[in-house]
Image: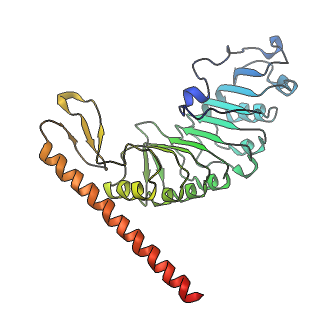
Amino acid sequence: MFQINYANNSPQYLFRTAIQPELVEDLRNTDPHATELFIHGKTKGLDLLASFRQLTKLWIHSVSQKEFTRILNSVNPEMLYMYGMRVEDLSLLGNLSNLHVLGLEWNPKAMQLWDLSKNLNLTALTIKGFSKLRDITSLAQAPNIQLLELEVDHTHPLLLETLQPLKELKQLTYLGLSNIKVADESLQPLSELKGLKELAISNQFSTEEFAKLSVALPNTTCDKFSPFVRVALPDGLDLMVVGKRKPFLNSNKDSVKMKKYEERFRSLQEAYKIELEVRGSRNIHLKDGVE
């Protein structure tokens, strides 16, 4: 059974990107009993992959659509990490029934994901550098995912309509969202992830959205669930005010501003607590009326 240690959620740990096996240039010179392989799209002897029946962990660099198809038609690993993809059609990933951990990084072609409903064993998924990705609806088909990372580079933010599909991922314990822009600007779907232990998210939503989510997820660790985040920047700036388009401050010189932002954050939290209490009371009354 493939085991994942979620104590360290970084992809470098999960996918051992610094200590993967030596790159194989020719599979004809490789032990067919190998359980781990690191190949690229131009590796010779790719037709032999189907004979590597004990293969459980596979790293792949630099693949075209044709090479992607050729490789995935021959393997069914428990861990797969792919970097440097020119692949628009990802549908073959849906055939990997053994997959527990999947990392996909840097793919400027794909605009949508694949049917994840058959990846029943998938518990950890990292998607980075998919600059054209717009639709994450199919993520709702993967309810067993415990760790999810969605991230694009700093020059090309991930542009999504909504985070609604993520509310179906009830098993999530770690969620990473970095450099994303959401059209409806709402974090509300994440409020349904009651089992979430850690949220790592960039400062690209309003202060109100972060304040509300901090109330909805009291057992979740997130540095944006407080008025400020500690940073280290030039000119003595050491605090980032939580919320998009908010300033950086100096904790020694900007005490008045700090107090203002803190009071604002706490007032938003209190207002949302009251809103939830009223909503809960109303639901109880409606239920009693029906009964």
Total tally of numbered discs in the picture: 0
Q: Is residue 283 above or below residue 176?
A: below
Image quadrant in which you'd find residue 228: top left
Query: Residue 242: x percent and y percent?
Result: 30, 47
Q: Is residue 114 above or below residue 98?
A: below
Residue drawn at point x = 48 percent, y = 58 percent: 191
Q: In this view, does 219 lie to the left or right of 11?
A: left
Query: Residue 40: x percent and y percent?
Result: 68, 22
Give the colour scheme shown: rainbow
Q: Which sits in the foreground, 41 or 95? A: 95
Residue drawn at point x = 69 percent, y = 32 percent: 80
Residue drawn at point x = 66 percent, y = 29 percent: 63
Image quadrant in which you'd find residue 29: top right
Q: In this view, does 92 lie to the left or right of 266?
A: right
Q: Is residue 282 above or below residue 265?
A: below
Query: Residue 233: x percent and y percent?
Result: 25, 30
| Res 115 seen here | no
Query: Residue 7: x percent and y percent?
Result: 56, 33
Query: Which quarter shows the C terminus?
Result: bottom right
Query: Which quarter shows the N terminus?
Result: top right
Image quadrant in which you'd find residue 147: top right
